[in-house]
Every structure is written in C-alpha cells, then in structure tokens.
Image: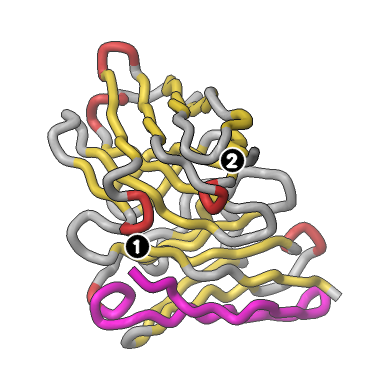
Amino acid sequence: QSALTQPPSASGSPGQSVTISCTGTSSDVGGSNYVSWYQQHPGKAPKLMIYEVSKRPSGVPDRFSGSKSGNTASLTVSGLQAEDEADYYCNSYAGSNNLVFGGGTKLTVL
Amino acid sequence: EVQLVESGGGLVQPGGSLRLSCAASGFTFSSDWMSWVRQAPGKGLEWVANIKQDGSKEYYVDSVKGRFTISRDNAKNSLYLQMNSLRAEDTAVYYCARWSWGRLDPWGQGTLVTVSS
C-alpha cells in the first residue's frame, strides 16, 4: 500500500498546457484501468476530474485529459486558466478492493 | 441532487473512540460501494476503507486495521466509521465518498477529527 508518486509541484502560464505524472507499479496503475484524478481547492472537498484513465465526467471541461503508459498515468491541463490552480491527486485501484492515492501535485498558474 | 453529508467529528483524547456518520441522498445508496478517505492537516489524501453494497465485505488500509470499522445501514441511507484506539496520527478531515467503477464521486464536505490531549 505505498502511495503513488506525483511531482510536488507544477506550473504554467495562462493558455499553456501542463502535464502531471503519477507513477505506480504493475500492482496498481500498470495493472488497472481504474485510474482517476481529483482536483482540490483549498478548504474544499476533492472533485472527480478524470476516471478510468481518460474519461471525463459531465461538466468537466475538455481542457482536462488523462492517459496512461505502463505504470505511469498522466493528467494534462490544456489552455490553463486561473481557476485551474489547485491540488491534484491521482488514485488507482490496487487490487483486493484497496485503493491508493498519489501524494498530490500543487498546480500554480503563473 | 446526489449528496453526502458527514458528521460526528470532534476532539478526542489519544486512546479514545469516535463514530463518524455519512448521510446519503439523491442516489440508490444500497447499490453502491462506499468509501472513507482522510486528509491530515496540510497533507495528501489517504484511502481508509471500503464497504460492499450489502455490508458483507470490508477493506482497510493497513494503518487502521483492527482499530477502525466501516459499516452501513441501507435502510437509513447511512455510512459509518467507528474509530477506536485513536492516535495523534489519525487527526484528519474524514470524507465519505461513493465508490463506483473505480471512481470516488461524489464526496461529502468532510468532518474534522482531532486526536489530542
């Protein structure tokens, strides 16, 4: 039950694109299509942004996209906007009905 | 509107107990797995426990096994987390969330548990 690895911080200017990585193992990210991403603004509850690696819930802008290669999943935010500044967490199914989160990435819009 | 509302948090001494509740509305509660996730002050998210639709199966992160018990009452659309032998490191905001097809959605607003003497 080791946490997934995310960079502590990421940044980009308005209009640019930024990609956040999430590295696990073959027991979680690499072995599951149940990889999801959550956005959390200060003092708020997390919000689902991406599920099943690359699917977007209704209401989430198409500027947010997800992908996976091997044991690493990625979240890309295109056309950065000020309101995208938040913490982002990846999550993966880890087998035996267990879940594991990444350590979180603080996204700063410069 | 799909909604989850947690309650029951507060200040408790080390070694003490606390029971959190999560009231669900706007969806068929008995059809979905449910989860508890916590977030220590200034830290990241940590999955705590999952429970199957009928309450017959429970799963926990290693750090709470033997101390925490997740349960549910489908007749009351409610999820619970019984926390015993609490430690300072259990201090966190505790969120309940619906776990469906690999996604946690929605989340409640969270309830703060502080373990301190």
Q: Quadrant of the N terminus of chain A?
A: bottom left
- Check chain identity for marks 2 and 1: say if they share one: no
* Marking on residue A52: 1
Of helix, strand and loop, which one carries label 2? strand
**Residue type of the residue flagged with mark 1:** Glu
Near mark 1 (Cα within 10 A), the count class, few <14, some 14-19 or many ≥20, is some
Q: Are marks 2 and 1 in contact (CB under 8 Å)?
A: no
In the image, farthest residue toward the bottom:
A70
Name the residue: 34% across, 84% down. Answer: A71
- Give above or below for A80 relative to B72: below
Chain for mark 1? A
Q: In which quarter of the image is the C terminus of chain A?
A: bottom right
**Residue type of the residue flagged with mark 2:** Val
Name the residue: 33% across, 12% down. Answer: B76
- Asked if residue A41 lies in the magenta stretch, the reply is no
Chain for mark 2? B
Question: Magenta segment range?
Answer: A1-30
